[in-house]
Amino acid sequence: MLTKVTKLEKLGGHKLRVHFNDGTSGEHDFSRLIEGPGEANVPLRDPAYFARAFVDHGAPTWPNGYDMAPEWLRLEMEKAGELRKEAAE
């Protein structure tokens, strides 16, 4: 199965709760990532701009075109112990 983000919840600052199509979700702080090099990161350092995140074709995306590979994000969150299986509704 191709990994996709299905939903993002803004938690303030540079934190998002990320929901994946495999039924897992978790909170992730993107602060370290956006402090890295690259012009596309600069607008995301403003928490108000960061909060404009949305899902486009299964990837977290921002208005300036910055997007994040969902496979990479899920792996990072898994390594950090941030993922939990969501309860069935």
Image (cartoon, rainbow, N blue to C red):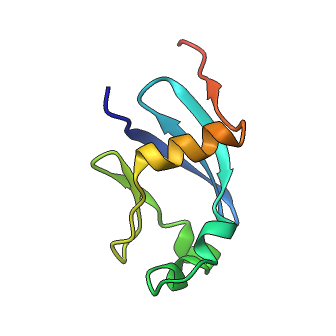
Against 16, residue 34 (above or below) is below
Q: Is residue 67 above or below residue 88?
A: below
- Where residue 26 sits: x, y (%)? 64, 38
> Where's residue 54, x and y in %?
41, 57
Q: Left of 64 or right of it: where is 31? A: right
Residue 76: x %, y % from top left: 59, 47
Residue 32 appears left or right of 52: right
Residue 79's quadrant in the figure? top right
Question: What residue appears at the point 27 percent right and 48 percent down from the top-left corner?
Answer: 57
Position in image of residue 80 (x %, y %): 71, 43
| Number of numbered discs overlaid on the protein picture | 0
Indicate whether 21 appears above or below 47. Answer: above
The quadrant of the image that shows the N terminus is: top left
Residue at 36% across / 77% down in the picture? 64
Query: Which residue extends farthest top?
Result: 88
Q: Nearer the viewer, residue 11 or 66?
A: 66
Picture residue at 69% right of the left edge, 38% below the top = 82
